[in-house]
Image: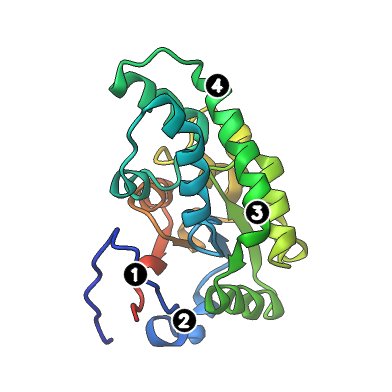
Amino acid sequence: MRLWTFVPFVNAKFRYDSRAVFDPARLSEFAALFFDLDGTLADSMPVHYRAWRSVLDPQGIEFPEAIFYSWGGTPAREIAARLKREASAEFDSEALATEKEARFLLLLPEVQAIGEVCELARLAHARGLALGVVSGGRRAIVERTLELIGLRAMFSVVIASEDTPQGKPAPDPYVLAASRLHVDPALCLVFEDSQTGEASARGAGMQVERVDQWVRD
């Protein structure tokens, strides 16, 4: 397998080419595939960051882009609470997270599908594999994003932040997803773009493909 050097957090544009790093013949090894949403199926992370900046800048709270990406997969309410702790700031973290999500919805039309990852999902669906989405986002946003990129109907299970007491990196979201599809976690393959998400999936006993380390232009 060819290897590419991955340099994170530099605003580089990535060319996702599933054929370069994943052999579709491997699909026969699995009973189910699970996909993260933001940064995996949807090129939405830059839009989420803009939404965060729009609510944090007026309060003078710093949120470096590198930190934002390293927290990928973390629910908005947990990000807001963590920012509050680390900045020793006085604000309502739940209200801030809600406002951030509202700002994101205004920007949602700018989000595009990550083509080759979505093509792989379509191929797996055509071959009869069970498919699910496991996201740290709120259900309303996850559902609208999937509708926007035209994939909602393919996924039998969608896990959002409201569905488990603990989100990624805890294994709970992926454990729940496998349970709802009645599949053995050992027979599941997960596509993720963050260390947080990878830790969650591996903790649930699943194999992981990191799409953020595939191909960079």
Residue 183 in the image: state x and y as whole percent: 60, 56
Horizontal arrangement in the rendering, residue 151 relative to residue 111 (left or right) = right
Q: CA distance from mark 2 to mark 4?
A: 38 Å
Image position, residue 92 (x, y; %):
51, 16
The amino acid type found where label 4 is placed reads Glu
What's the residue type where badge 1 is placed? Ala
Q: Amino acid at mark 3?
A: Leu
Mark 1 or 4, nearer chain start: 1
Which structural element holds mark 2? helix
Q: Which residue is mark 1?
A: 12
Which residue is tagged 2? Answer: 18
Which of labels 1 and 4 is toward the front?
Answer: 1
Closest to the camera, between mark 2 and mark 3, is: 3
User: Where, quadrant-wise, is the N terminus in this rendering?
Assistant: bottom left
Q: Determine the residue positioned at 45% across, 78% down.
A: 16
39 over 141 or under it: above or below:
below
